[in-house]
Image: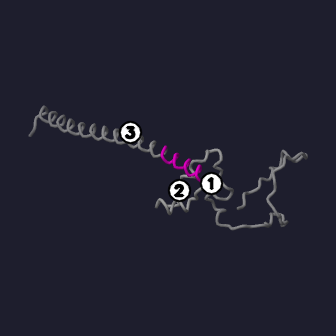
Amino acid sequence: MATEEEIERRVQQADTARSAKRSAAAKQVGVLAQRRTAIAEQLDDIERQLGEVLADSSDVIDIDELARFTDVPAADLTRWLAARKPSRSKRKKPGTGVSSDANRGPSTTKTSTTGQAAAAPETAVPRTDAHAADTPARVPAGVS
């Protein structure tokens, strides 16, 4: 049977080997993560430049021609062109989000809870009557 000192030495020896492996793994992950970040930044810059070139040349060559000439898929060219636009102009079209309404299909008339048909979505207008505080304002649902 091992003595207390022998047990402590064995545990320290095992911990030292484990600690060295953990340290090496952490260092390797850190180095690779830094490289990945640098490469991702370079890729973002290249894609931005591609978008600018595509936009600048759109008056003389279209996406399909570029795809034929370069063997770069038109979908990639289109994505780069769309990504270069300023973020403030990237607006989500109504009805393009994923929701339960996405599969309903177009509807021009709906029957309300009172049985009346509405021809178009209503615009929210501030109420000025006495019941305005008691009744919530109608908010139109987006219809695609």
Q: Are marks 2 and 3 in contact (CB under 8 Å)?
A: no
Q: Quadrant of residue 58?
A: bottom right
Q: Nearer the viewer, residue 109 or 74?
A: 74
Give the extent of the magenta segment. Answer: 45-59
Q: Earlier in the sequence, mark 2 or mark 3?
A: 3
Q: Which residue is mark 2?
A: 77
Image position, residue 79 (x, y; %): 54, 55
- Foreground mark, 1 or 3, reads 1
Label placed on residue 101: none
Q: Residue at 52% across / 49% down in the picture?
A: 50
Image position, residue 111 (x, y; %): 80, 66
Q: Earlier in the sequence, mark 2 or mark 1?
A: 1
Prevailing SS of the magenta stretch = helix
Mark 3 neighbour class, 10 Å CA radius: few under 14, some 14 to 19, many 20 or more: few
Q: Is residue 104 located in the magenta-colored stretch of the structure?
A: no
Q: Which residue is mark 1?
A: 59
Count of numbered circles in the view: 3
Image position, residue 45 (x, y; %): 49, 43
Q: Residue at 31% across / 39% down in the picture?
A: 26
Q: Amino acid at mark 3?
A: Gln
Q: Amino acid at mark 2?
A: Leu
Q: Residue at 69% across / 68% down in the picture?
A: 105
Circle 3 — which element? Answer: helix
